[in-house]
Image (spheres, helix red, strand yellow):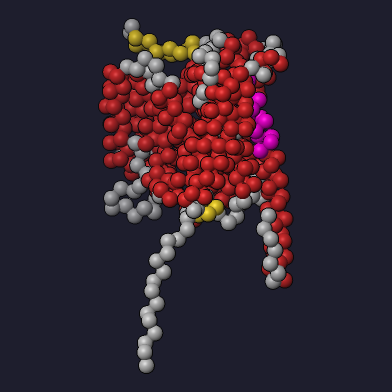
């Protein structure tokens, strides 16, 4: 009697699935972010609308006067003074970028971006969503040296605005789509941070930059060796970490690098994992800070920035201005470039790498989400201010293009998402009916 050959273990590599949440904790985190960003997105829209109304009303003089009022502090002969609008862009947005730094570190340390096989699709999607809009802008406006500096304006996605749209119209859509949008936005933020740090840095002062490393190192040491204190005592972070953070921010501002980059580096300095000997049952310091500061960012800092930045006057803006190379480059970059770049990048990457989409996601869903990725609001407005200072026509014109394109992308993408949600709902209902009768049905 011959023995049957022993069964060999299955060594075939498992196929990777893109955009599927990797764990229950990841699902919970996504749900929390969506909830908070939805509220923040609503406040952002309200603040922007109020600003636009004021800028185009008899109160426009008051609004512009408030925005351009100088504020600051002085120590002896040394003064630190900026306009209120400038404080909103450089100061308040540092909190937004601090949270971006926390989110980026969490994704790279323990999230989906730590695995190259799972990271490659969102990274490629974000890169496609940056490259194609930039090329469209350069095609229309790149030949003009005065306009070429604004090439990065249509490359950014406003996560709060986009998630708000997704939450309003996409309740019937698969959770994997939210994972897609959030992961895409995290990588998009990283690219925007790099662009701001490199392309919009002028008159670099290495002395101030190196000086900033000292308080930054102190912040890192305190955050790592005092993590238990900062988790349990809310006041300790304000009295110990905040002063160091302000010093780092001020030195980055004086170095010529945009001060919001200091927020990113401070976020990177916060530990994501438990200290040695801890069980890991408690939230990490990064999670603790995210819970504490996201409401501050979404509820106060970003809406105030939108209030002081989105107030564009449309007086005297005619058809010729709205069809100028600057406006066309920004608007078409956001409305057309984002969907084409993201969808094409996902298609090529999944085909070349032989990666499957999550079974719940269809290609029309990818197109729909990539359309609302064309909502380039907060970071686009920031880059617009860096590229075109107040006082030149391009400043107002570029912001007008961002507002028009973001509104159009929200309406068009939101409508498409709503239609996809209805398709998924019909498909789910048909599947439920089929399960009851044991008859297969086709998916939407």
**Quarter the C terminus occupies:** bottom right
Q: Is residue 39 left or right of residue 76?
A: right
In the rendered view, tell whether residue 294 sits above or below residue 434: above
Residue sitting at the far top: 77
Whole-percent x, y for residue 27 in the image: 52, 52
Q: Is residue 94 left or right of residue 254?
A: right
Which residue: 56% across, 23% down?
139
Whole-percent x, y for residue 398 in the image: 59, 19
Quick one: 152 or 179, which is closer to the camera?
152
**Quarter the N terminus occupies:** bottom left
Quick one: 169 or 396, which is closer to the camera?
396
Query: Could one spot residue 48 in this view of the protein?
Result: no
Whole-percent x, y for residue 79 in the image: 38, 10
Query: Could one spot residue 427 in this view of the protein?
Result: yes
Which residue: 36% across, 28% down?
245
Which secondary structure type mostly characterizes the magenta part of the structure? Answer: helix
Number of marks in the rendered image:
0
| The image quarter in which residue 53 lies | top right
Q: Is residue 408 magenta?
A: yes
Quick one: 21 or 89, which is closer to the camera?
21
Q: Is residue 400 magenta?
A: yes
Residue sitting at the far bottom: 1
Which residue: 62% across, 26% down?
331
Which residue: 69% across, 10% down?
316
Quick one: 173 or 118, which is closer to the camera?
118
User: What range of the chain is rendered magenta?
Assistant: 398-413
Whole-percent x, y for residue 226 in the image: 30, 40
């Amino acid at each position: 009697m011959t023995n049957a050959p022993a069964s060999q273990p299955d060594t075939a590599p498992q196929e990777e699935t893109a955009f599927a949440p990797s764990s229950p904790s990841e699902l919970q985190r996504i749900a929390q972010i969506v909830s908070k960003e939805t509220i923040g997105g609503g406040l952002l829209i309200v603040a922007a609308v109020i600003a636009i109304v004021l800028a185009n009303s008899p109160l426009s003089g008051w609004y512009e006067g408030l925005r351009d009022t100088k504020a600051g502090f002085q120590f002896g002969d040394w003064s630190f003074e900026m306009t209120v609008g400038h404080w909103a862009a450089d100061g308040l947005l540092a909190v937004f970028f601090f949270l971006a730094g926390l989110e980026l570190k969490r994704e790279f340390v323990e999230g989906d971006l730590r695995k190259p096989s799972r990271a490659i699709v969102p990274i490629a999607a974000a890169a496609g969503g940056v490259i194609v809009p930039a090329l469209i802008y350069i095609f229309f406006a790149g030949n003009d040296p005065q306009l070429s500096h604004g090439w990065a304006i249509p490359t950014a996605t406003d996560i709060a605005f986009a998630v708000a749209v997704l939450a309003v119209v996409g309740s019937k859509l698969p959770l994997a789509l939210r994972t897609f949008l959030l992961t895409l936005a995290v990588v998009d933020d990283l690219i925007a941070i790099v662009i701001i740090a490199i392309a919009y840095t002028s008159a670099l002062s290495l002395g101030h930059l190196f000086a900033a490393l000292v308080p930054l190192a102190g912040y890192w040491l305190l955050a790592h060796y005092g993590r238990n204190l900062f988790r349990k005592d809310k006041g300790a972070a304000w009295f110990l970490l905040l002063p160091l953070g302000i010093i780092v921010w001020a030195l980055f501002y004086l170095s010529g690098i945009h001060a919001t980059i200091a927020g990113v580096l401070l976020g990177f300095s916060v530990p994501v994992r438990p200290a040695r000997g801890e069980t890991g049952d408690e939230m990490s310091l990064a999670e603790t800070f995210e819970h504490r500061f996201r409401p501050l960012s979404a509820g106060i800092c970003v809406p105030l920035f939108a209030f002081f930045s989105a107030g564009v006057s449309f007086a005297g803006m005619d058809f010729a201005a709205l069809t100028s190379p600057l406006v066309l480059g920004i608007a078409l970059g956001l409305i057309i470039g984002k969907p084409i770049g993201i969808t094409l990048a996902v298609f090529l990457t999944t085909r070349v790498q032989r990666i499957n989409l999550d079974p719940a996601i269809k290609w029309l869903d990818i197109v729909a989400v990539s359309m609302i990725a064309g909502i380039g609001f907060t970071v686009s407005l920031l880059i617009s201010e860096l590229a075109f200072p107040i006082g030149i026509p391009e400043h107002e014109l570029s912001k007008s293009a961002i507002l028009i394109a973001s509104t159009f992308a929200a309406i068009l993408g939101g409508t498409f998402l709503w239609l996809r949600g209805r398709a998924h709902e019909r498909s789910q209902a048909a599947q439920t009916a089929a399960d009851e009768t044991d008859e297969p049905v086709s998916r939407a």
